[in-house]
Image (cartoon, helix red, strand yellow):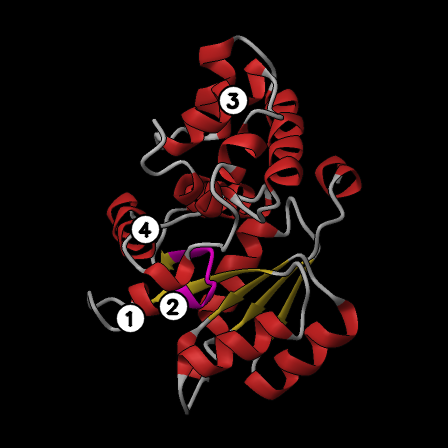
Amino acid sequence: MAGKAQDQKTVVISTSDASLGDHYCSILDKIYPVTIIASLEETLAHTRETGPALLVLDPRLVEQDLNHSVADILSNNAGIRLIVIEGDADGDIDQHALFKTGVHGFCKQDISAALLCKAVQLVLEGEYWIQRKLITQVISELATDASTITSRPDGADDSLINTLTPRELQVARMVHMGGNNKMIARELEISERTVKAHLSAIFRKLDIENRLHLALYFSGRT
């Protein structure tokens, strides 16, 4: 299909629930090349060998510590994005701990087709599919944890910020306030592609990796 031809980002669905895997696949394979894998061991091997863009992980596959398995997946697959499937009951997984470990999104087993496609799209674009209050909570924790503050000389932060163009600074502050690419593009009357280009430049100039780090960087500077 045209969507697949344009976007070769591959998706792996890791679940032993055949019905769930087939359901997710039927939605996503209209857009992305999708592989379903039914064991954690095969998932680890496959991701190392093929380097998919996104892994959708069913935590029921993990018999031991879920955080440890997630950390293992992320450390062995540079650049991979990770969505963890939630069960029907709230609190069946520790989203807070998993987010801090590096998970990029969470989705319910019965998520609608439209929302699943949106979640995958945004996560692949470098954003997060999680509750806003969770991001706020983690940013607050990081901001009050002295061990997370980079040891730069006094004034170095402002010096780096001064390397940003006025437009880049505007985009950075909008991200800090919680804006996503679409919202920023609409507000500034520019394309989402241009927003992404600005973000790439911002990350490079400030020597940070993602939107969460950018939000933390600007905490207390607005």
What is the magenta range? 100-106
* Closer to viewer: mark 4 or mark 1: 4
Sequence-first tag of 4 and 1 = 1
* Closer to viewer: mark 2 or mark 4: 4
Sequence-first tag of 2 and 4 = 2
- Mark 3 residue type: Leu
SS class, disc 4: helix
Q: Say left or right for 133 vs 15.
A: left
* Residue 178 x %, y %: 36, 33
Q: Which residue is mark 2?
A: 98
Q: Answer whether residue 101 is magenta in the image.
A: yes
Q: CA distance from mark 1 to mark 2?
A: 6 Å
The tag on residue 169 is 3
Query: Residue at horizontal 65%, vertical 24%?
Result: 193
Q: Which residue is mark 1?
A: 94
- Mark 4 residue type: Ala
